Amino acid sequence: MNRPLREVTLCNWRVFRSTTDRLWATREQPFSLAAEKAGAWRTVDADDELGLYQAIAEQESIADLAVLPHEVVEAIERQVAVLESTYPAWKIARLYDKYGAPGGWVAVRHAPLDPAEMKAGLVAMVEANDHVALVAKLSGQDVIAHQRGYAIRDHGAPLWISSPPKS
């Protein structure tokens, strides 16, 4: 038999029991956009109170980790700017884990590759766990491109296939 529907507020979460005897909680205020992108859910459910409290704690933890200090965000932006100026053929981005903490790196070419370039060993995307490994992979792509004589392609506006060759 269902217990009576009881609604309480717990740490900014409204907790209630459904007509099917399942416990639910909805956060009274939305999470930040960064927290939502990191995977924080505003509504959770569980079979029992302990499970519900654990689910609430997990969502709050995800939200807490999603808000990076301003200094960290600025440092990441500086790293991306330096990498993109060094490797103009690539759009470079920092990856984040499911909790919003900085993770690996990804680089995607601005220009699409043709079959001959791919056969030569050039790739459209590179992923790495850290910036040192990313630089090594991008440098390797530059070596292949320079050995094959690829440097710039003009599709209305120049698009680098590799970093400019060293003079």
Image: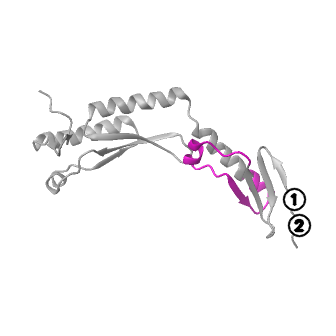
Circle 2 packing at 10 Å, graded few (<14), some (14-19), many (20+), is few
Closer to the camera: disc 2 or disc 1? 1
Image quarter hosting the C terminus: top left
What is the three-letter code of the residue carrying label 2? Arg
Q: Secondary structure at mark 1?
A: loop
Q: At 20% across and 51% down in the image, what residue appears?
A: 113
Residue at 54% x, 42% y: name it.
Answer: 100
Query: Which mark identifies residue 95?
Result: none
Is 148 within the magenta?
Answer: no
Return the x and y of residue 132 as percentages of the image width and height.
35, 34
Position of residue 138 in the picture relative to residue 67 (left or right): left
Residue 107: x and y in percent read: 33, 43
Question: Residue under circle 2?
Answer: 3
Against 114, is 152 above or below? above
Could you tell me how far apart the alpha carbons at marks 2 and 1 are, in whole angstroms? 8 Å
Residue at disc 2, secondary structure: loop
Q: Which residue is mark 1?
A: 6
Please report contact status of discs 2 and 1: CB closer than 8 Å, yes or no. yes
The number of numbered badges drawn on the structure is 2
User: What residue sits 50% from the left and 29% below the top?
Assistant: 72
Q: Nearer the viewer, residue 121 or 82?
A: 82
Q: Please give left or right for residue 164 compared with residue 54 in the image.
A: left
Q: Quadrant of the N terminus?
A: bottom right
First to last magenta residue range: 28-54
Left or right position of 66 against 54: left
Amino acid at dot 1? Arg
